[in-house]
Image: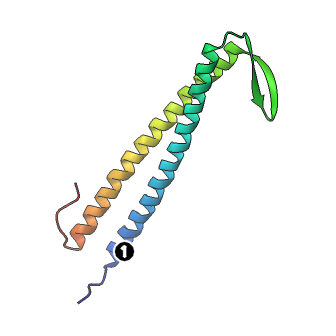
Amino acid sequence: MSREIPPKVQQILKQLNDMQKTYQNISVQKQQIQISLLEAKNAFDAMKNSEDEYVYRLVGGVFIKMKKNDVISELEETIKLLETRIKVLEEQEKKIIDDMKKAEDEIRKMMGGGPPAS
């Protein structure tokens, strides 16, 4: 005997599916930002270890000669910004995970299922 899925459960399942897609998008964004952060940190370390007063920076397909300290300052700002963005995405990940667990528990209750997920 098959049980029909109530409309309310179908709605929650759709919401759960949407939350999973959102979680995947957040995870991809976080990975991309982590890669950018790693690149910025590597560039920062290379600048710090350089004894040159000037460095060349690629801007719009053209190399521009800049003072090393200016580039270091820009890299520090970029690193801080990227770290902040990662923290925000991690908070969003935690919230969406909690929301998905709540939705799963609600579906389980509505379908008369077993104990809630832990």
Image coordinates for residue 38, horizontal then vertical, percent: 55, 32
Spot the residue most to the bottom.
1
Judge from the rendering whether residue 49 lies leftward or rightward of residue 34; answer left or right: right
Q: Is residue 5 above or below residue 101?
A: below
Q: Is residue 108 above or below residue 77?
A: below
Spot the residue most to the right.
62
Residue on which the image places disc 1: 10
Q: Residue at x 35, y 52 (%)?
A: 97
Image coordinates for residue 76, horizontal then vertical, percent: 58, 21
Spot the residue most to the left.
115
In which quadrant is the C terminus drawn? bottom left
Image coordinates for residue 80, horizontal then vertical, percent: 53, 26
Judge from the rendering whether residue 96 lies leftward or rightward of residue 65; answer left or right: left
Q: Residues within 10 Å of mark 1 (few under 14, many from 20)?
A: few
* Near-viewer residue (50 or 88): 50
Judge from the rendering whether residue 105 lies leftward or rightward of residue 84; answer left or right: left
Number of numbered discs overlaid on the protein picture? 1
In which quadrant is the N terminus drawn? bottom left
Image coordinates for residue 59, horizontal then vertical, percent: 77, 31
Quadrant of the rendered image containing residue 67: top right
Q: Residue at x 50, y 32 (%)?
A: 84
| SS for callout 1 | helix
Quadrant of the rendered image containing residue 74: top right
* Near-viewer residue (14 or 24): 24
Q: Is residue 66 above or below residue 95?
A: above
* Near-viewer residue (112 or 54): 54
Q: Residue at x 42, y 41 (%)?
A: 90
Q: Residue at x 24, y 68 (%)?
A: 108
* Near-viewer residue (42 or 102): 42
Identify residue type, mark 1.
Gln
